[in-house]
Amino acid sequence: MKSGKRITLSPRPVASPEAEAWVRQGDDGSVARCNLNTARLTIDVTPALRVRIKVAAFTQGVTVAETLRALLQREFPETSV
């Protein structure tokens, strides 16, 4: 049932170029998340450990995933067979 009321929508806000650049900063393909040869790994950690990992990644200027990938690569290096 129509009420006869007209609803007007405001125009879409103009996107900020800085915001768009920030959103698209990972589009260069350098992040391994786009790689088809990856597998997802889920682990449970304490909230305190999660915070420590996030702070360490932030202070290094990298993502948590990049930090953990580097840690796992150091701990489990590829061995030549």
Image: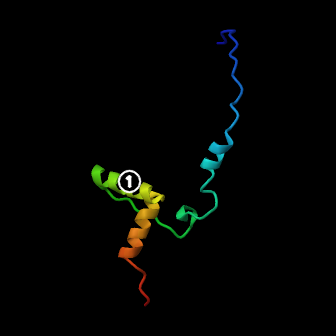
- The quadrant of the rendering that contains the N terminus is top right
Q: Disc 1 designates what residue? A: 55
- Residue at the location (69% across, 22% down)? 9
- The quadrant of the rendering that contains the C terminus is bottom left
Which percent across, then down, holds residue 60? Answer: 44, 60
Which percent across, then down, holds residue 5? Answer: 68, 10
32 left or right of 51? right
Which percent across, then down, holds residue 15? Answer: 68, 38
Q: Quadrant of residue 11?
A: top right
- Residue at the location (47% across, 57% down)? 63
Against 80, is 33 above or below? Answer: above
62 left or right of 17? left
Against 39, is 14 above or below? Answer: above
**Residue that lies at the very extreme toward the top in this rendered image:** 4
4 left or right of 22? right
76 left or right of 14? left
Residue 40 visible to an observer of this rendering: no
Q: Quadrant of residue 70?
A: bottom left
